[in-house]
Image (tube, grey):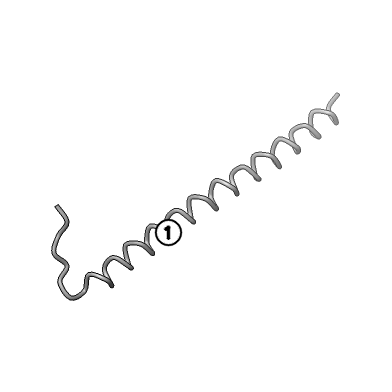
Amino acid sequence: MIPDLGNYAAEVMAAYGLSILLLVGIVAVSLRRGRKVRTQLADVETRRDRANV
């Protein structure tokens, strides 16, 4: 099931590992940023609703 990578197995596996880590990092940063923006938007909407009352 695992392909024979020959002499470059270490380099290929390192590239796969680094790619996976970068993708996980991008997802984590995106989720954190989305949570922060959602909170800021809720605050702005709350202030707008209080000003209109």
Q: Is residue 14 above or below residue 39?
A: below
Task: Name the one closer to the observer, 30 or 21.
Answer: 21
Describe residue 23's horizontal placement relative to residue 41 as left or right: left
Name the residue at 26% across, 68% down: 12
Q: Quadrant of residue 14?
A: bottom left
Name the residue at 59% across, 44% down: 34
Residue closest to the far bottom: 7
Describe residue 18's horizontal placement relative to residue 39 as left or right: left
Task: Name the one closer to the observer, 13 or 41.
Answer: 13
Describe residue 2's horizontal placement relative to residue 50 as left or right: left
Q: Quadrant of residue 53?
A: top right
Q: Which residue is mark 1?
A: 21
Name the residue at 55% across, 46% down: 31
Name the residue at 52% across, 50% down: 28
| x then y, percent, for residue 18 | 38, 64
| x then y, percent, for residue 30 | 53, 50
